[in-house]
Amino acid sequence: QVQLVESGGGLVQAGGSLRLSCAASGRTFSNYAMGWFRQAPGKDREFVATINWSDSSRNYADSVKGRFTISRDNAKKTVYLRLNNLNPEETAVYYCAAKGLTAAKYDYWGQGTQVTVSS
């Protein structure tokens, strides 16, 4: 089992920045690829970014490339998402998730952290 707890969300003006954190506990954090997803009101959850276990590979949704940065610190068992130049359409609950090395899908999810971008 892996427990994930997100933090760092809040209210920010359009064009502003936030850094989200996701602290993991339980099994070996470095065995997991980590991802960030978001769900806006009335919309489906969507992929934002992912990072593999060794930080040798990072991938982003096209809509956030160049503005968001995913990173991880395996010693601290934490994954981060830096959000820059936010726009109001990115108001959503942001979730982190963990996927085992051989897993086909994300096995573990956090409870989410709210990001609200005002215009």
Image: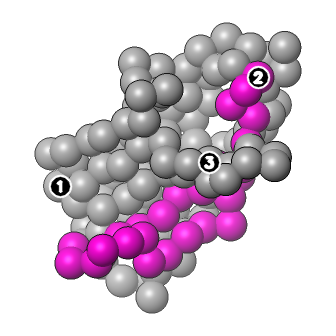
Name the residue tied to disc 2.
Answer: 88
Q: Position of residue 119 (x, y in %)?
A: 84, 14
Three-letter code for the amino acid on which mark 2 is drawn: Pro
Counting other residues with Cα less than 10 Å from the Cα at mark 3, is it few (<14), some (14-19), or many (20 or more)?
many
Secondary structure under badge 2? Answer: helix
Q: Amino acid at mark 3?
A: Arg
Mark toward the start of the polypeptide (1 vs 3): 3
How far apart are the alpha carbons under marks 1 and 3?
Answer: 23 Å
Mark 1 neighbour density, 10 Å: few (under 14) some (14–19) many (20 or more): few
The one nearer the camera, 116 or 46, is 46
The image shows residue 84, relative to residue 2, as above or below, that is above
**Residue for point 68% across, 58% down:** 112
Q: In the rendered image, which residue does mark 1 sit on?
A: 54
User: Which region is colored magenta?
Assistant: 88-114
For the residues marked 2 and 3, what is the alpha-carbon distance in whole angstroms?
A: 14 Å
The secondary element bearing badge 3 is classed as strand
- Between 26 and 43, the residue placed more toward the observer is 43
Discs 1/3, front = 3
- Secondary structure, mark 1, is loop
User: Is 86 located above or below residue 77 in the figure?
Assistant: above
Is residue 102 something that shows in the picture? yes
Residue 103's disc is none
Seen at 73% across and 48% down, the residue is 43
Q: Position of residue 49 (x, y in %)?
A: 42, 43
- Which amino acid, mark 1? Ser
The residue singled out by tag 3 in the image is: 38
Nearest to viewer (mark 2 / mark 1): 2
Of residue 59 and residue 43, the one placed in the foreground of this image is 43
